[in-house]
Image: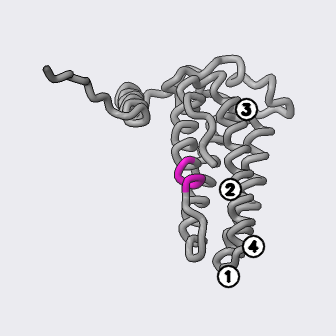
């Protein structure tokens, strides 16, 4: 008699499929109508008292969507194989993360400022390391780039964890890698 066994896909495939479905549903569910808190016309010296921080964004809000895009971009950057000849790819991925971070910061209206500043600082260090890797591909340049990528990963993890309090779907994979 033969024993039948069910074959299940690996856990990461199930998680990836669920995340893709959730992102697709979020993208299709919101047709670009403006949110109710879209009139932050005044900026004050104390961003903690600004109106956007009192209204928690929903999982499909622009802030959460921008945070998800930032998380995906960081994931691409932090999973690059560092080595000689990879400086240009790292710089390209880095430029994408910076663009996504700037978009996120504009939507966040000062929220998570300490975490976004820390991520920006770590991206600056990575920019320097990637430039050195391109101009002087050596073992020490590779090591410095790996160290800088770990710094980006740590800063990004801190930011994504903080964002996760208002956008739970972002914190589902708050540690981007490395």
On the image, numbered disc 4 is attached to which residue? 140
Where residue 136 sits in the image (x, y, percent)? 69, 82
Label 4: which secondary element? helix
The answer to if 46 sits in the magenta stretch is no
Q: Is residue 105 above or below residue 51?
A: below
Q: Are marks 2 and 4 in contact (CB under 8 Å)?
A: no
Calculate the distance from the C-alpha at mark 4 to the C-alpha at mark 1.
12 Å
Earlier-in-chain disc, 3 versus 2: 3
Q: Which mark is residue 111?
A: 3
Calculate the distance from the C-alpha at mark 3 to the C-alpha at mark 1.
37 Å
The quadrant of the picture occupied by the N terminus is top left
| Residue at the outermost left position | 1
Where does the magenta region start and end? 75-79
On the image, numbered disc 2 is attached to which residue? 149
Residue name at image x 52 percent, y 52 percent: 76
Q: Is residue 47 above or below residue 56?
A: below
From this viewpoint, is residue 20 visible? no
From this viewpoint, is residue 18 visible? yes
Where residue 26 sits in the image (x, y, percent)? 41, 28
Where residue 172 sits in the image (x, y, percent)? 55, 28
Assess disc 2: are there few (<14), some (14-19) or many (≥20) residues with their C-alpha within 10 Å of its C-alpha.
many
Residue name at image x 27 percent, y 29 percent: 7
């Amino acid at each position: 008699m033969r024993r039948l066994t069910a074959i299940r896909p690996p856990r990461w495939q199930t998680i990836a499929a669920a995340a893709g479905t959730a992102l697709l549903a979020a993208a299709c569910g919101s047709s670009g109508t403006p949110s109710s808190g879209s009139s932050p016309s005044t900026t004050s010296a104390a961003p903690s008292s600004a109106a956007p921080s009192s209204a928690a964004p929903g999982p499909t809000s622009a802030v959460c969507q921008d945070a998800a895009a930032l998380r995906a971009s960081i994931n691409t950057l932090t999973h690059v194989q560092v080595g000689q000849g990879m400086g240009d790819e790292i710089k390209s991925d880095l430029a994408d993360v910076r663009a996504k971070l700037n978009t996120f910061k504009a939507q966040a209206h000062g929220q998570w400022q300490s975490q976004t500043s820390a991520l920006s600082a770590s991206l600056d260090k990575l920019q320097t390391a990637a430039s050195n890797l391109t101009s002087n591909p050596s073992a020490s340049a590779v090591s410095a780039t790996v160290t800088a990528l770990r710094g980006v990963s740590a800063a990004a993890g801190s930011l994504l964890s903080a964002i996760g309090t208002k956008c739970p779907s972002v914190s589902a994979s708050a540690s981007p890698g490395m």
